[in-house]
Image: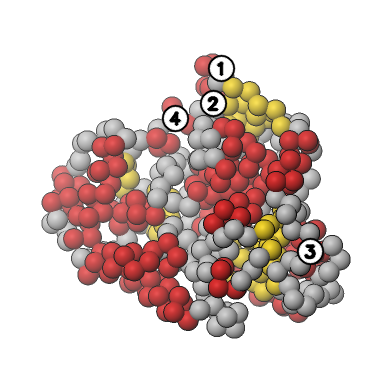
């Protein structure tokens, strides 16, 4: 693998332990994937910084990077943590987890991370443009950045994104190279998509079929940012999809034509019946709901507006929690615009900085969760063994206020 003189110096430890360690990680990955060189990146997004993922070993590693001159070289945002950043005490999150989490955040901050603590970095200012190379972890954000923004990233892990953020470079292979971005499997959508959760169901179904290939959707019609965010998250949950194209919507559709010349490897059709089956897979809760969880991926301002509209004048029923996850940046705007007040008046909680999966959900003893996200549904049942039902947002809110 070719390294510039500067990169060699980093690897030789001339700039300290942190850059040396980061370079070692990136070179090792580059060699595995036969990368010919490194490429400079405009930003990094690091996952795995929740105490749940990081643990004690992660804290020690971060500390060693900090004392070894570790400073991020490019804009580096971070994924959700294990605690909501303002309300962890009020909502009863365990203090021991909170203190460890705050220590992790503090270490990252001292290394110059921009924080954010969200899986929608592109909505809070880490917004790469088409063709820009980035190194992002968090599979839903990777899929969105590659597909909707046309930025170029592989599906990084927490450690490799961290290393790339420190070095400001990533190995040049995979989705950094145009030829690897062509569509491979044609997906003809015949189902009627009515809302965000239908897009979650579609992505979950297609991800399972295409695994880690590049699907090209036709017949999707129009889609909102929130629907594309949902599609990205779901494709990356049941499969390992890091890039998709949508006819008439995503910016790299010319690469679809490139693929057409080679002919698609497979053609898939999705109709209303196949979509309904996904809802049926996640339909184990019919009574005694503990938690209604919205915001996986984190809610946009538009989603909070929609929720506030649905909740206005209603009350979340006793014995049920309505937890809505977003970034702190979006929560601040929601507060300024009065949306937060409407949601809180109805008894809902807007949690910022954490997420349903990175939090110690078992601490709350939740057994039955309703959500509009197949990603949340998938991990709640697989990681926490919680009964879960998938419903469109409107129905989730009806359950929360006791009308559903
Ligand atoms: Fe985001 Fe957590 Fe879901 S990181 S995509 S809210 S699992």
Res. 322 image quadrant: bottom right
Per the image, label 2 sits on a secondary structure element best described as loop
- Specify whether 78 is left or right of 391: left
Hey, which quadrant is residue 288 in on the image? Answer: bottom right
- The answer to whether marks 4 and 3 mark residues whose Cβ atoms lie closer than 8 Å is no
- The answer to whether residue 28 shows anywhere in this view is yes
| Residue linked to disc 3 | 287
- Give the answer, above or below, for where 107 lies relative to 227: below
For mark 2, what is the residue? 184
Q: Position of residue 108 (x, y in %)?
A: 36, 68
Q: How is the image coloured?
A: secondary structure
Determine whether, in the image, residue 358 is placed left or right of residue 290: left
Expressed as whole percent of the image width and height from the top left, the position of residue 60 reads: 28, 68
Q: Residues within 10 Å of mark 2 (few under 14, many from 20)?
A: many
Q: Quadrant of the N terminus?
A: top left
Q: Are marks 4 and 2 in contact (CB under 8 Å)?
A: no
Looking at marks 1 and 3 on the same chain, the residue that comes earlier in the sequence is marked by 1
Specify which label sits upstream in the sequence, 4 or 3: 4
Query: Mark 3 or mark 2: which comes first in sequence?
Result: 2
């Amino acid at each position: 693998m070719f390294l510039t003189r500067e990169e060699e110096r980093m690897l030789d430890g001339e700039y300290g332990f942190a850059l040396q360690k980061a370079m070692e990680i990136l070179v090792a990955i580059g060699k595995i994937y036969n990368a010919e060189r490194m490429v400079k990146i405009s930003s990094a997004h690091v996952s795995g910084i929740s105490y749940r993922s990081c643990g004690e070993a992660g804290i020690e590693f971060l500390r060693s990077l900090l004392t070894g001159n570790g400073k991020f070289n490019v804009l580096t945002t971070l994924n959700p943590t294990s605690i909501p950043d303002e309300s962890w005490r009020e909502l009863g999150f365990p203090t021991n987890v909170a203190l460890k989490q705050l220590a992790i955040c503090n270490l990252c901050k001292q290394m110059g991370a921009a924080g954010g603590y969200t899986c929608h970095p592109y909505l809070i200012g880490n917004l790469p443009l088409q063709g820009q190379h980035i190194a992002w972890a968090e599979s839903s954000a990777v899929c969105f950045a590659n597909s909707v923004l046309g930025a170029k990233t592989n599906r990084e892990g927490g450690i490799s994104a961290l290393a790339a953020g420190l070095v400001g470079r990533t190995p040049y292979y995979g989705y950094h190279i145009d030829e690897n971005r062509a569509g491979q499997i044609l997906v003809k959508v015949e189902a009627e998509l009515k809302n965000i959760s239908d897009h979650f169901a579609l992505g979950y179904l297609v991800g399972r079929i295409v695994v880690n290939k590049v699907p090209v959707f036709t017949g999707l019609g129009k889609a909102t940012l929130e629907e594309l965010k949902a599609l990205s998250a779901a494709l990356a949950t049941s499969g390992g999809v890091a890039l998709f194209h949508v006819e008439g919507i995503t910016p790299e559709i010319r690469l679809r034509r490139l693929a057409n010349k080679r002919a698609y490897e497979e053609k898939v059709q999705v109709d209303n019946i196949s979509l309904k089956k996904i809802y049926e897979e996640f339909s184990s809760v019919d009574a005694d709901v503990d938690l209604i969880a919205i915001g996986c991926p984190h809610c946009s301002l538009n989603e909070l507006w929609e929720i506030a509209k649905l909740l206005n004048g209603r009350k979340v029923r006793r014995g049920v929690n309505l937890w809505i996850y977003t970034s702190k940046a979006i929560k601040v705007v929601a507060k300024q615009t009065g949306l937060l007040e409407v949601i809180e008046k109805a008894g809902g909680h807007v949690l910022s900085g954490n997420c349903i999966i990175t939090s110690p959900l078992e601490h709350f003893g939740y057994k039955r969760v309703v959500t509009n996200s197949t990603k949340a549904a998938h991990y709640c049942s697989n990681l926490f063994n919680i009964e879960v039902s998938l419903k469109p947002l409107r129905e989730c809110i009806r359950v929360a206020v006791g009308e559903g």
